[in-house]
Amino acid sequence: MFQGSYVAIVTPFDRRGDVDYARLEALVEMHLAAGTSGLVPCGTTGEAPTLSMREHKEVIRFVIKRTKGRVPVIAGTGANCTREAVELSQAAAKAGADATLQVSPYYNKPEPMGMFLHFKAIAEATRLPIILYSVPSRTAREIAVETVERLANEVREVVAIKEAGGSLDRVSELAQRCPRIVILSGDDSLTLPMMVVGARGVISVAANFMPKDVADMTSAALAGDFARAREMHLRMFPVFKACFIETNPIPCKTAMEMMRLCRGDLRLPLSPMLTENRERLARALRAYGLLKA
């Protein structure tokens, strides 16, 4: 079920800084038309840490309602407070989410046992499929392979992991030790290399503004056409790298503003893109053909 190109969809804001639901609906429809495999609202790219609890629940409910079951919705409901993650996950389950994305608890730095018990508690509270999210650059803690293996063996709701640690060795080890767990890339520039060693797709940032291209690349790789997938990967690679010249989702939202897909407004503490980096991003978009020269 969870394979292909899933988009870590942005949360668009209006001039007042409120969630722009009309624009969010337009983005959902854009992805459905472009062949995106599924939607992931309220992740890192969706600026979940800056959403209120009410906004967080409503964005998830809204995306599920507008998607109308046409593709799966993986709700970002992770938190560094287990009770908060449970509350968000239960709300997502009630709204009809197909699964939840659970980031490793940040700031707390739990030990492996605490990590295991955190995810187990969320699973028991909702019974929804869980996609683990290991992103040590943001959380200061990797979900250890041994912990993933234990979860795979003991918690049936844990079905996949989003890998954003940048290590192909780790992806290979996960594929070898946890064959039941679907691996999804969390780094656009590593999606194809990860798929070569066993990943089944990506939860993508770049798909926010180039959904068909990312979907086509993952579809080619899943079909075993790695020559075509490699050609597409290499062409998109400069755009993938430009997406992360500043903290995500600053470049992504800036690109979407340049392409008139949504406003580029961010909530503090994220700030507008530096002028020199904005120019670098624009050059990459123009070279790919996403902006007019």
Image (cartoon, helix red, strand yellow):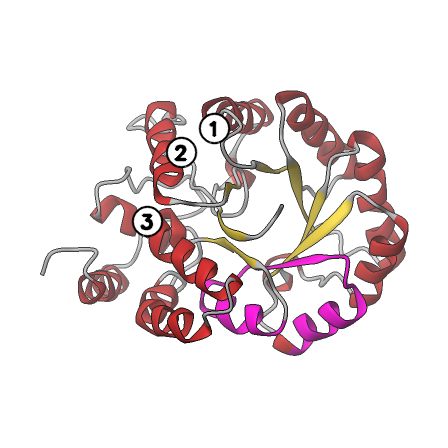
Is residue 104 visible in the rendered image? The answer is: no
Q: Which residue is mark 3?
A: 209
State if disc 1 and disc 3 touch (CB < 8 Å). no
Main secondary structure along the magenta-highlighted residues: helix
Q: Where is residue 292, by image quadrant? A: bottom left
Q: Which residue is mark 1?
A: 67
For the view shown, which residue lies furthest in the bottom direction? Answer: 169
Q: Is residue 178 left or right of residue 71?
A: right
Which one is earlier in the sequence, the residue at label 2 or at label 3?
Answer: 2
Q: For the residues marked 3 and 1, what is the alpha-carbon distance in whole angstroms?
A: 18 Å
128 and 87: which one is in front? 128
Residue range corresponding to the magenta coloring: 169-197
51 and 153: which one is in front? 153
**Residue type marked 3:** Phe
Q: Is residue 117 above or below residue 231?
A: above
Instruction: Locate residue 169, reporting x and y percent.
Output: 67, 78
Q: Is residue 45 above or below residue 187?
A: above
Please tell me which residue is depicted at 52% across the width and 74% down the height of the picture: 193
Q: For the residues marked 2 and 3, what is the alpha-carbon distance in whole angstroms?
A: 12 Å
Q: Which residue is mark 2?
A: 28
For the view shown, which residue lies furthest in the left direction? Answer: 293
**Residue type marked 2:** Val
**Residue type marked 1:** Thr
